[in-house]
Amino acid sequence: MTGRLGAVRAGLWLIAAVLAVRQLVAVLSTPRGERLTDLETWIGPGGVLHVRGSLYDLPDRFTGTPFAGLVLKPLSRAAEQALGWGWTFGSLALVVALGLVVARALPQPVSRRTSLFAAPVAISLLMLSLPVRNTFTTGQTSIIPVLLVLLGCFVVRGEKTSGALIGVAAALQPTVLLFAPLLWFTGRRRAAVSSGVTFVAATLLAWAAMPHDSWTYWVHHLAGSGLSTAPAANANQSLHGMLLRFGLQGPLEIGLFLALGAAVAVLGLRRAITYARDGQLLLAVAVTGCVAVAVSPTTWQHQLLWVLLAVVGRVGKRASDRHMWPVLVVLALTLPSTMMLPNMSFLEPIRDNVVLIAALAAACVVPFLSRTSPLYQAPIPTEHAEPGPARWKHVPLVPGWRRVLTRPNLLLELLLIRVGYSAYQQVRLAATGGSISGGRATAEAHGHQVHSIEKFLHIDIEHWVNHTVVGHAPRLEDFFNFYYTSFHFVVPLSLLGLMYVRRPAEYRWARSALGFATLLALVGFWAYPLAPPRLMPGLGFIDTVHGVQDFSKPDYGTLTQLTNQYAAMPSLHFGWSLWCGIVIVVLARRRWVKALGLIHPLCTVSAIVATGNHWILDAVGGATVVGLGFLITYVLQGPRARTVLTSATAKAPSPSRSDTSLPQAPPAR
């Protein structure tokens, strides 16, 4: 076991190193005028820190505190000489230090495995997070206040010194002063006083050195709240920014912001004090940081790192729910909101405020477990089937891929489906260089290859079927058009929903097979862009769904700018329908239901051929990836686990039965 843990730990450190190198290369390979853009406006040639006038004469050039300008000015000459290398490697060192401190600060007790894996996992998550990536790209300093607070809370000995570090952080980012009440009410009163005194001293020092700028920042712009020219932008993930995006302005908006901010501050700090007294100081720091994110007039992307720290909180009574909160936070802090939620108008209020909602949830809503709760260390266990036999002795089952019998967390499943589909869209588009027309020549060349192969095999029936349906069966044409555009998503999603409710064990088996099949299809889209028959000039196919096309600029409705129509091989239209058919035939009891399962892929393959959207070989490719998806699932976990249908059997399984798919009773406590 020790050797296995060591190997996994080495792999995690390797991943962290690769992510760090990737981030360095991404920044240093960017042309000089396009990298470290914020830093360039500060200390580059003609930057505001070189100008003898006010730091705030030009809007959006410098929005930090006067103390930040006072600290950065002496460094401007040296930093100008190493604008790329020095600042980038310095930021990397700060991220590594932050990850190490976070790993050290995890609430005790932690398992040996967690203690070994915490540091590389923390550093990897930081490298992947949008705040850190934005900090590297723009050259911001927002990692420094977070690191100073963590050093003051977990590393430095002596309350006065720790308070001084937090005070300096507050002088750089004023809302960090909210940590003073946390220190005061958790018994570290000297640290609270020291942080306040340090903040005042640093602010007065900057005021003495730059009185005009200090007046502009603290009085004229109300602690910097008016420095930004676009506070309503989606990048401002604060309550103030959200209210502005809702269309509120003037005294009403200001009054509502102050009232909501005060409520969030009081409730959030009370929760943070409770968690700190419970021995979860890192969670208390995260909650306080989330309060600072919400109540600040402007909280830009590089200042959102506090929210990521909230992953340390434990939520949920069941073991299967324990990963829900960390996954939500990581997705919100690593992926664009458009990947998490569909582009629908009624979802805009959520999509535009995803990180703010996560911060508010962490500060005020999420019921983090207390360490005194028996569920903190031992949640309600997940029911598993007995391990199944391996198909081949030389291909053992994956030990961690245990066959779960219980229903997974619904929110996580919905996020998994949404993020997976977003990745599917992105890969389809990226396969042709990010544009619809980017891979047209290659896709058409591949189309001629496929057509030639089909003629050689005497299966090139697409043109005949297409023209027969269009010319002689208008009702059949309408039916195939409707089937092609409607059933592709409706049937798989309905089947997944039904299995989730009625057959959770089979749901996991079927969902895994579908996921693997889709991943394999993405590889096909990337490696072999292919034009469908309807977009092949000179072959005479009729696009029954979208009408006559200009092949240089095809138009297929609202999806024209969103999808890559040159991703035809393999056909997921047929692949997903075949997956539905297999699942229905395997799980259904009645013969007529099994027959419907067989009819669905038959109708789908007829529709994709008759409408000119796929070649016959595309369907063969779809069937191949689906078969491989089921095969991979079988290789990883063995035979599928079966849901116990009768409640009496589920509650009291008979030990004499040999059916290994029955759930095993949990051990007595």
Image: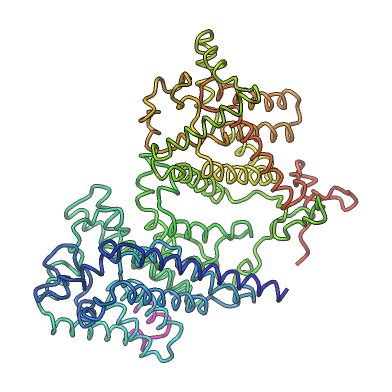
What span is colored magenta in the figure? 180-192
Does 223 appear in magenta?
no
Q: Position of residue 202 (x, y in %)?
A: 23, 84
Using the image, determine if residue 636 lies above or below residue 162.
Answer: above
Magenta stretch: dominant secondary structure: helix
Looking at the image, residue 356 sits to the left or right of residue 472; the answer is left
Looking at the image, residue 616 sits to the left or right of residue 4; the answer is left
Residue drawn 43% across and 60% down? 333
Image quarter in which the N terminus is found? bottom right
Q: Position of residue 395 (x, y in %)?
A: 77, 55
Image quarter in which the C terminus is found? bottom right
**Quadrant of res 137:** bottom left
Using the image, determine if residue 603 lies above or below residue 384.
Answer: above
**Toward the viewer: 370 or 128?**
128
Residue drawn 36% across and 25% down? 550
Using the image, determine if residue 5 lies above or below residue 164.
Answer: above
Q: Position of residue 205 (x, y in %)?
A: 18, 85
Q: Position of residue 494 (x, y in %)?
A: 59, 34
**Toward the viewer: 568 or 55?**
568
